[in-house]
Amino acid sequence: MAKNNSLHPNSNGETDDSPNMLVYRKMEDVIARMQDEKNGIPIRTVKSFLSKIPSVFSGSDIVQWLLKNLCIEDQVEALHLGTLMAAHGYFFPISDHVLTLKDDGTFYRFQTPYFWPSNCWEPENTDYAVYLCKRTMQNKARLELADYEAESLARLQRAFARKWEFIFMQAEAQAKVDKKRDKIERKILDSQERAFWDVHRPVPGCVNTTEVDIKKSSRMKNPHKTRKSVYGLQNDIRSHSPTHTPAPEAKQPTEEELREQIKFWQAQLDRHRLKMSKVAESLLSYTEQYSDYDPFLSTPDPSNPWISDDTTLWEMEASKEPGQTRVRRWGFGIDEVLKDPVGREQFLKFLESEFSSENLRFWLAVQELKRRPIREVPTRVQEIWEEFLAPGAPSAINVDSKSYDKTTQNIKDPGRYAFEDAQEHIYKLMKSDSYSRFIRSSAYQELLQAKKKKSKNLF
Amino acid sequence: MGEMEQLRKEAESLKDEITAARKAVQDLTLQDHVAGTAVVGRVQLKTRKTLRGHLSKIYAVHWGDSKLCVSASQDGKLIVWDSYTTNKVHAIPLKSSWVMTCAYAPSGNMVACGGLDNMCSIYNLKGKDGNVKVMRELAAHTGYLSCCRFLNDNEIITSSGDCTCVLWDIETGSQKTVFAGHLGDCMSLGVAPDFNTFISGACDFTAKLWDIRDGQCRQTFGGHESDINAIGFFPNGNAVITGSDDASCKLYDLRSDQELITYQDSGIMCGVTSLAPSFSGRLILAGYDDFNCNIWDSLKAERVGVLSGHDNRVSCIGVTPDGMACCTGSWDSFLKIWN
C-alpha cells in the first residue's frame, strides 16, 4: 500500500484524517479485491418464490474468500474480520438489521461507495426522521419498521414536532421518486440505505462503529469534510473512495526549531550503539531466565491463586520466610536482591555479620531520600552526609575523590539528587564486591538449599 | 532563505548519518538470532473474573498490587477493585466524567486520574476518617490528560494532549520538570523499572526516552505510520514496546538505538489501544479496536493467542506486578481478568 501524505501530521500535530480513516482504507482495499471481476466473490441474482433477489452472495462465500485470499488462519478469525467489516457497513445481511457475518447461506450485499464510512458521515436526526417516515409510507412487508425503529420514530416526532410538516413533505417527495425507479434497482438501493442507517443508528445493544475515542476527536480538523445531509446531495454520488486522495503539505519548521533539531541529532549521532547480535542475545537470555517465573509460561508453585482459588502463593510471598524459587531469583543479579524487601533484609543481615553494611545502608538511605517530600529533603541530606560521608562519619563509605568533591558541592544546595554520583559509585562497588560475596556465602546457600517448609505465619 | 536551506540540509544529512550508524550495528537481526528458538506454544488464557459495575465505556485500568486495581470510566467514576473477590473497595465519584486515565501509587496509598479537565487529580485512599477525598489537583497542562504514573507518593508524571509530559511534586502541586519535544499529543507514558527514565508515545508517530532528573530527551524512535497510543518497557528495562493506530506494535532497543521487530498481521486492521508485556517479556499482550486482545511471541513476532470476550473496543490492559494475571478493560463497560 502506498504511503499517503495525509498520514503525516503537520507541526500542530493535526492530521487531515479521522482516526478511523486508516482502518477504512485497509477495509476498502479488501472490498476492492472482493469486488474484482476475476478473483472476487461471485455475485448473483437468486430466484426466490415469486421474485428475484438481486446482487447477492452468501456468508459462506465471504468466509471462504477471506480464508483463501488473506493470511487468515481459521474460520474463527475470518468470521471476526468479516463481522468487523459488516459492522462498519461495507457489506450487510439483506434481511437483518444486526450487522454480523454468519458462515452459512445468509445473503449479503455490497454497500455503495456513496454510503461508505470513509465519507465521514455524521447524519442528522432530521435525516433519520425523513428516512423512517418514508418507510412508513411504503406498503411493503420488507420495509416495515422494527420495534426499535418505531420507538425512534415516535421520539423523533416529539422532538421535531414543530417541523414535522417539513419532514413529512421531504419523506413524501422521496417516496414519490423511489416509486419511479426500476423495481430491482429499488430493492438494492433500499437495502443499502437501510444498511447505512444500521451503521449510524444501530440496533440497541449493537456497537456503534462510528464512535471515536474522545482523545482523538478533539484533534480532528476539517469539519467541512464531514457529510451531514444524506438526502440533500443525491446528485453527488461518488463512485470511488475518498481515502486515497492526497492531502495538503505539512507545515515547515522554524529556524529555531531546526537548530534545536540539529543539536539533538548531533548528540544522537555521537552516542554509542550496541551491536544487534548482543542485544538479541541479551533479550533471549533474559526471557529464558525469567520464563520459569512467568505464570503465563510456567505453572507457578504451588499454584496460580486465580486458577486454583488457593492463595498459598501470595501468603508465602508476604511471609518473611522466602521460598527456594524466590531465593534463586536473587542470584540473577543485584537488582533482584534490592527489589525484594526480604532480599534486602537478608543482604543487609549478611553484610552486618561482616561489619561491612555501610554501603548498602547508604544506598538504601539515598533511595528513600528520593521519595521524600521536598520540605524534608534538606534535613535528610544533612543527616545522610553526617552518617556516611562527613569527616569522622560513624558509617564512613569509600567514594572516589571525584564523586566526593561533587557531593561536597551538592550538599551546599541540597536536593534529592545530591548523592547521585556517590550512589552510583557505591552501587557499582556493591555489584562487583558485596553482592558476589553474598551469593557465595553459606547464609545464602543455606536459604537456597532449604527444604520448603510450611510457613508458620499463614494468618 | 539561504541559511534556512543550509540548516535543512544539515538536519537531513545528520539524519542520514544516524540511519547509517544504526545500520552499521545490524550485524544480525533479532529474527536471525532466534531462528533456532521454538515459538512459544499456543497460549490460551481464560476469563477468571468479570468486574461489573461501571455504567459506561472504561478508558483505563492500572494494577496496584497482585489483587487491587483501579479503573476509570466515562460514567464519571473511579473504582478500586479487589479483583480476586470482585468486590469494589472504593467507588470514587469524579468532578469531570471525561476521564481518560488512572493510576495506582506503588505504595497503595493513592490513586490519580485525569482527562478532558486537563488536570491530574490525586485521591488519598488512606485518609483518617476512611473517606476518599481529593488530595491535590495538579493543573497546568493546556491539553487533555492522556496518562499518568506515580514514581512514589510524592512524585507523579503526566502526559498530555498539549504535547508535553510533566513531573509534579504532589505535596506542593507544582511542576518540577516539563518534558517538551513531541510534535503531537502525548498519548501514553511508561516508567523504567529503575525509575530513572520514562518513555512517551505521541501523535507525531514517535516514542521518546526522557531522563527524569535533567528533563532531557535522550532518544527518539520513529517508524510507526500513525499515532502511538500505547507504550511500555520491556521488563529488562533495555527495550521499549509501542502500539499504534497503524495496527502494529514495535519493539525498540535502547542500547542499539533502533527498532528490532514489528508485530503485525494483514488480518489485523484496527489500531492498538493498549499493551502489556508478560512477566518475562516473552509474551506481549495488546488490546485492539476490533474488540480483541492479541498475544504475541515477542521474540518470534508470531501471534500465539487471542483473548476474545469483549463486545466493544479493548481500551486498556495491564499485567499484575507478579505476572499472575492480566486485566482488560473495554468500552463494553466490563473488566475481565485472564490467565
Image: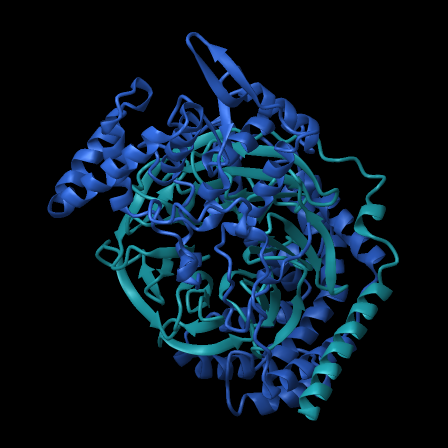
What residue is shown at x 50% (from left), y 30% (from top)? A83
In the displayed structure image, the side of residue A395 where residue B113 appears, left or right: left
Residue A334 drawn above or below residue A201: below
Residue A435 location, x and y as percent? 72, 60
Residue in front for this viewpoint, A380 or B108? B108
Q: Indicate the quadrant where residue A257 lies.
A: bottom right
**The N terminus of chain B lies in quadrant:** bottom right
Q: Indicate the quadrant where residue B87 lies.
A: top left
In the displayed structure image, the side of residue A316 where residue A355 appears, left or right: right
Residue B46 location, x and y as percent? 52, 28
Q: Indicate the quadrant where residue A72 lies.
A: top right
Residue in front for this viewpoint, A218 or B124? A218
Residue in front for this viewpoint, A316 or A114? A114
Chain in blue, by letter, is A
Residue A407 drawn above or below residue B304: below
Looking at this view, name the residue that lies furthest to the right: B27
Looking at this view, name the residue that lies furthest to the top: A49
Residue B282 in view: yes
Residue A372 in view: no
Q: How is the image coloured?
A: by chain
Could you tell me how many numbered marks the image carries? 0
What residue is shown at x 65% (from left), y 33% (from top)? A36
**The C terminus of chain B lies in quadrant:** top right
In the displayed structure image, the side of residue A47 where residue A450 appears, left or right: right
What residue is shown at x 59% (from left), y 28% (from top)? A78
Residue A213 location, x and y as percent? 42, 52
Residue in front for this viewpoint, B183 or B105? B183
In the displayed structure image, the side of residue B76 where residue A97 appears, left or right: right
Residue A158 location, x and y as percent? 13, 41
Colour applied to chain B: cyan
